[in-house]
Amino acid sequence: MNSVVVETGEAVTKVGSSVDDLPSVVFPTERGTETERLRKALDVYDERIFRLDGTREENTRPPLLLSVDSFLSREERRKLVEVCFEELGVPAVFLGKGPALSAFSVEETTALVVDCGHSFTRIVPVWNGHVMGGQSRTEAGGRRMTEMAESILLEKRPDLAETTGKILDTRGKALWGYGEVVESFKESVMEIRSSGAQANRQSVGYTLPDGTDVLTGDERYGIGECLFEKEFAACLEKSVSGCPENIQRVLLSKVLVVGGVSLCSGIEGRVEEEGRGRGMGMRLIETSREDKKFSSWTGGSIL
């Protein structure tokens, strides 16, 4: 029997069959505990996949493989397993720590995983498929970048929140939500550069849904800069130095940058630069955009 692979990320939940290359259901993660997110993920998957094509009988479920945060406590993991067996009725469940699964997605069992997520940036050493004790994280991620992008946008268009929802389709439904506009603006104008590089003085334009143009200059570099405050380099060093000396060089030769924020142009070069600033030469594992975006889920499907 094929298993269902579930990753309840901070911003996006991915669910799909282990035989597929990519998750078949992807939707925004709702707030709540890990168990609440899991229940929601399986409900959505049932509705969109199983109950539509009739591939399983009522009240039966396939085995589950769950990608979980490596910072999740033993008690939280125990509760997840308990819910799977007692409430959801799954015949078997396996918990895989996200960073280890990300390494598996690129056919590696050892890597220094830099996971740039929505709420946190995690730096996790993985050795022979196991998460090592040196893992660390910073409270900077996609959410903080979005907040900075929103601040820039509102300086230029203070009325944006009031006017965005007024652009309707033929059925009277809003074509754009305020949050969607902010995210689109962020992804279009932000740029991550090396710390010593001079700013490109040329302005970058962005066209709002109502057709008006917004120009941004040097401030667009500040959106991504929040990821690389002093805390990032310190956490990078802490994660490596927290591992035995005889594996540190191997970890630095296999640095894997993943997560939704890792899709930003220039981020990998900046991670290397931050490492060099702490005397750590790195070699990054090359990955595709799909690998970065779905790394943990893909690793789970391979496993």
Image (spheres, rainbow, N blue to C red):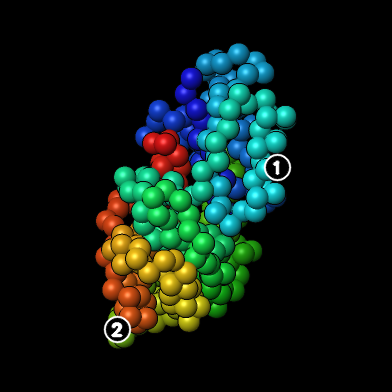
Residue 168 percent coordinates (x, y): 56, 48
Other residues around mark 2 within 10 Å, as few (<14) / some (14–19) / many (≥20): few
Q: Earlier in the sequence, mark 2 or mark 1?
A: 1
Q: Residue at x 39, y 61 (%)?
A: 112
Q: Which residue is drawn at 47% across and 23% down?
A: 2
Q: Which residue is drawn at 54% across and 54% down?
A: 70
On residue 79, which mark appears?
1
The reply to whether residue 184 is in sight is: no
**Three-letter amino acid code at the position of disc 1:** Lys
Q: Please tell me whether mark 2 or mark 1 is closer to you in this view.
A: 1
Q: In which quarter of the image is residue 59?
A: top right
Vertical relation: 139 (above or below) 22: below
Q: Which of 152 and 276 is in front in this view?
A: 276
**Three-letter amino acid code at the position of disc 2:** Ala
| 107 left or right, relative to 150 | left
Classify mark 2: helix, strand or loop: loop
The reply to whether residue 249 is in sight is: yes
Q: Quadrant of residue 221?
A: bottom left
Vertical relation: 282 (above or below) 291: below
Vertical relation: 149 (above or below) 195: above
Residue 281 percent coordinates (x, y): 28, 73
Residue 160 percent coordinates (x, y): 58, 67
Q: Most extreme residue toward the right, as rendered?
A: 87
Classify mark 1: helix, strand or loop: helix
The residue pinned by badge 2 equals 197
Marks 2 and 1, how far apart at CA:
48 Å
Q: Which residue is drawn at 56% across and 16% down?
A: 56
Q: In which quarter of the image is the C terminus?
A: top left
Q: Which of 266 and 6 is in front in this view?
A: 6
